[in-house]
Amino acid sequence: MVVNVIGLGYVGLPLCLEFAHSGLTVVGIDVDPERVRRVNAGESYILDIPDAAIQKLVRSGHLKATTDFDVLSTADAVCICVPTPLRKSQDPDISYIVAALDEIQPRIHPGMLVVLESTTYPGTTEELMLPRLSESGLEVGKDFFLAFSPERVDPANSRFGTRNTPKVIGGVTPQCTERAAALYRHAVDTVVPVKSARAAEMVKLLENTFRAINIGMVNELAIMCERLGVDVWEVIEAAKTKPFGFMAFYPGPGLGGHCIPIDPLYLSWKLKTINYTARFIELASAVNSSMPEYVVGRIHEALDQCRRSMK
Ligand SMILES: NC(=O)c1ccc[n+]([C@@H]2O[C@H](COP(=O)([O-])OP(=O)(O)OC[C@H]3O[C@@H](n4cnc5c(N)ncnc54)[C@H](O)[C@@H]3O)[C@@H](O)[C@H]2O)c1
C-alpha cells in the first residue's frame, strides 16, 4: 500500500514515520524543496524526531519525499496536513487546503482514499472537498473515499505521540470511515470512529475551544485576584488538590502554540455565517488577547514600586 502525506510539518512528518514504520510505503509531498531534501537526506527539522528515525526508513525504502504531486496518481491514500492559519481579518485561511485539493482533484482515481487532517471549520470536508473531488465523475463511498481525521499531536510531549494518541475518524459515508480507520490502524493504537466528517471536525474544535475558554477564564480570574489582593497561583494550587471535577489552567501573557488562539475562531467564523454568535469563544478570545497589555501594565506598576521607569 502506498500512502502520500501532503505537508511535511509538525503533523505530517511524524505521521509519515508511523505509517512507514508499520511497513507501508510512504511518499511525503511538500512545496518546500528544502524540507523535501532534508527528509531524503535523513535530516530532521522537527524537535521530537531524531535523524536516525528518518534515516532508517529512508534507507529501507519505506519513506521518501518529493515536490512532485504526480505521485498522487498511483497512491492508495493521501492525508492532507497543510497549515490552516487566520487571515489578517481573523477569518479562516483555507487557501492551503484548496491548493492541496487542486493537486489531488486531477489525479484522483478509483479506490483512492483522501483524508483531511488539518484543523478546520465543521463542513470543510463535505462542503469544500466533496464537491471538488466529485467533479472527477467518481462517486464517494463507492469509487473513492473521503474522511476527516483531526491531528492531536502535542509537540515535545514525551508521553503521548502519534501512535499512542487515539485518533478520531469521521467519513463522508460509512464506507469512507471504514477505509480511513483501516489505514490509520497501521499508525495508531486506537481508532475512534464517529458518524460523520462534520462530527470529527467538531471534535477537534471542542478540544481546542475547551482549552481556549478555560485559559480565558483563568486569565480573568488572575485579574480578579489582583483586584481582591489574593495570590492567584496559591488559589490554583489549592484548587488542584480536589481529586475530581477540577482541571488546572494557568494565567499568562499569551496563549501557547499556534492552535489554541486560532482554532476556536474557525468555529466562531462558521457560526457567524449561519447567524449565530459563539459567545464563549468571542469572550475568551477578547480576554486572552488583552493579556499582553495587562501584563505590561503589571510590569509598569512593579517597576514604579522600585522607583524605576518603564524605559
Ligand atoms: N503543530 C501542532 O501542534 C498541531 C497539532 C494539531 C493540529 N495541527 C494542525 O495541523 C495542520 C498542519 O500543522 P503543522 O503544525 O504540521 O504545520 P507546519 O507549518 O509545521 O507544516 C505544514 C507543511 O505544509 C507545507 N505546505 C504548505 N502548503 C502546501 C501545499 N499546498 N502542498 C504541500 N505542502 C504544503 C509547508 O511547506 C509545511 O512544510 C494545521 O491545520 C494545524 O492547525 C497542528
Image (cartoon, grey):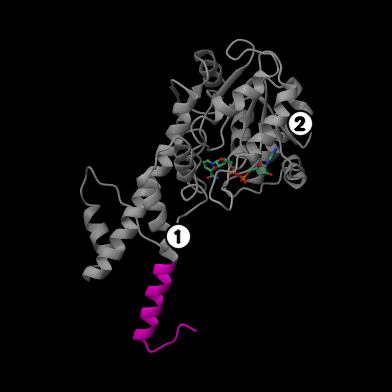
Give amino acid for label 2.
Phe
In percent of width and height, residue 119 lies at 53, 38
Residue 242 placed where, x, y %?
20, 48
Q: Which residue is mark 1?
A: 254
Is residue 113 visible to the viewer in this orientation of the structure? yes
Image vertical order of residue 77 relative to residue 137, above or below: below
Mark 1 Cβ and ligand 1 under 8 Å apart: no
Q: Quadrant of residue 7?
A: top right
- Residue ID for mark 2: 69
Front residue of this view, candidates 68 and 244: 68
Amino acid type of disc 1? Gly
| Disc 2 element | helix
Q: Nearer the viewer, residue 110 or 33?
A: 110
Q: Residue 281 placed where, x, y %?
A: 39, 47
Crowdedness near tag 1: few (<14), some (14–19) or many (≥20) residues, C-alpha within 10 Å: some
Is residue 46 rendered to the left or right of residue 258? right
Provide the residue span drawn in magenta: 293-311
Q: Is residue 15 magenta?
A: no
Q: Horizontal placement of 135 versus 152: left or right? A: right
For residue 263, above or below residue 58: below
Q: Residues within 10 Å of mark 2 (few under 14, many from 20)?
A: some
Residue 150 pos. (x, y %): 51, 33
The vertical placement of 111 against 147, above or below, is: above
Say which quadrant the N terminus sits in. top right
